Amino acid sequence: MIRYFGILLAFYSGAAAAVTFEQVQRDVFEFSCAGGGCHGGSVFPTLLADRSFSEIVNVKSRQNRNLFLIEPFNPTDSYLLRKIENRDIFGDLMPQSGPIALERQQLLRDWIVGGALEFGEPESSTSNNFSAQAFLQTTSSSSNVSFTHLINTSDTPLEFVGTLYNGDGSRLGAESQSLHTGVVAPQGRLILPSDELERLFGVDPWSGPAVMEIRSTSNFRVMTRLTSPSGLISNTNCVTTNQVDNVVGFDSSDVTYIRFINTGDESITDITGSLYDESGNLIGAADSVLVETLPPRSQVWRSRDRLSSAVGDSWNGTASLKINTPPAALKLLNLNYINNETFFNFSCYESATAQTENRSALVPPPTPRYGY
């Protein structure tokens, strides 16, 4: 179940493409609903071109009197869309012959998000220009349970939409899916467990950890708490960009895993790096290929053993891994697997900053780096 702190009620107004009612009528209602003796006049609501708008927009559902069939700006609570997406409904899925194509479902959703206008074309929303990622979202079937916290650090109520990507970069469910009803108040938070994300996106448990891109209209922060089978909790949403500082050696029972994450829209090829021991000595070969190809939005693991094989040598103690000319879209997640049950994240770090010559001057403290 989603957990809310400081939630106010409001309409959803997330990002969507500009969609007209004419498109929805032609590509959704007439294509899938109004024919075959269904919603062509004999079954409420009538979805013929001359009657559909007046029978669905701001009209109460007969199956769920608490909801409108179409509520402008609010796809989550629009009952007609719920029927088409087969979520939280009474009776049968619409249409009864089976679900319509996802792109047609998205067309209806985008029209509602744009205000469900009868005439004219809404402007495409470009207001959701604040984005961040949850980098390690486990599934409900995993023994390590993740809870992603979205914290509103702005001065205004916010709504959040998300897009979920599997390890191979493929999208899971709809793009820019609403992550809640209502809004999150300033300094409030929304907590999303994996089973709730599976319900929201309408997907089965995915294979391995996923990445979720989250968007909103102002500042927010993301933290993912991973609970291990022992009950120990760690934050897995801290990433770095060009160096990993805690690669434990072969004299330790802990095992290091580095997750290479491509947050961009283009493939990254031939990711190379060098390992250095505690004395600064190069381990094995310099600039060894660690990942040959990383498709857009995808992620791969490299264990300590895989890193050792890549450079052609082993080490004791704690090593550092430095990536050669990392692209901006590359993010690195440095996890240690401890006691065969718990992942701890060692990606966070603080960079030293130059101090002024005048030691009596007030010098601001260094700014923590979190890799966003």
Image (tube, rainbow, N blue to C red):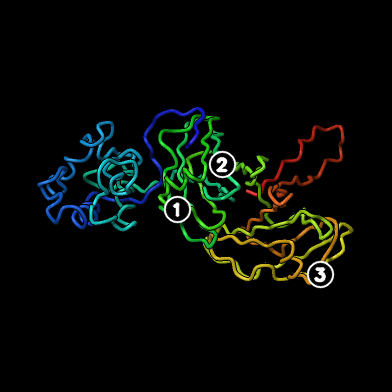
Secondary element under disc 1, as helix, strand or loop, is: loop
Of the numbered discs 2 and 3, the one sitting upstream in the chain is 2
In the rendered image, the residue lying farthest to the left is 42
Q: What residue type is labelled 2?
A: Phe
**As rendered, which of 122 and 284 lies closer to the eye?**
284
Residue marked by disc 3? 313
Q: Residues within 10 Å of mark 2 (few under 14, many from 20)?
A: many
Secondary element under disc 3, as helix, strand or loop, is: loop
Which residue is drawn at the image coordinates 79% and 58% (left, top)? 320
* Total number of numbered discs in the rendering: 3
Gap in Å between the C-alphas at discs 1 and 2? 17 Å
- Checking the image for residue 204, the label placed there is 1
Q: Residues within 10 Å of mark 3 (few under 14, many from 20)?
A: some
**As rendered, which of 141 and 209 lies closer to the eye?**
141
Q: Which amino acid does label 1 sit on?
A: Asp
Which residue is drawn at the image coordinates 74% and 61% (left, top)? 304
Of the numbered discs 1 and 3, the one sitting upstream in the chain is 1
> In which quarter of the view is residue 63 placed?
top left
Q: Are marks 1 and 2 in contact (CB under 8 Å)?
A: no
Residue 324 position within the rendered picture, expressed as x and y whole percent measured from the top left? 72, 65
**Position of residue 47 in the picture relative to residue 137 (left or right):** left
Gap in Å between the C-alphas at discs 2 and 3? 37 Å
Q: Which amino acid does label 3 sit on?
A: Asp
Of discs 1 and 3, which sits in the foreground? 1
**Position of residue 189 in the picture relative to residue 350 (left or right):** left
- Checking the image for residue 147, the label placed there is 2
> In which quarter of the view is residue 311 placed?
bottom right
**As rendered, which of 268 and 207 lies closer to the eye?**
207
Residue 120 position within the rendered picture, expressed as x and y whole percent measured from the top left? 24, 47
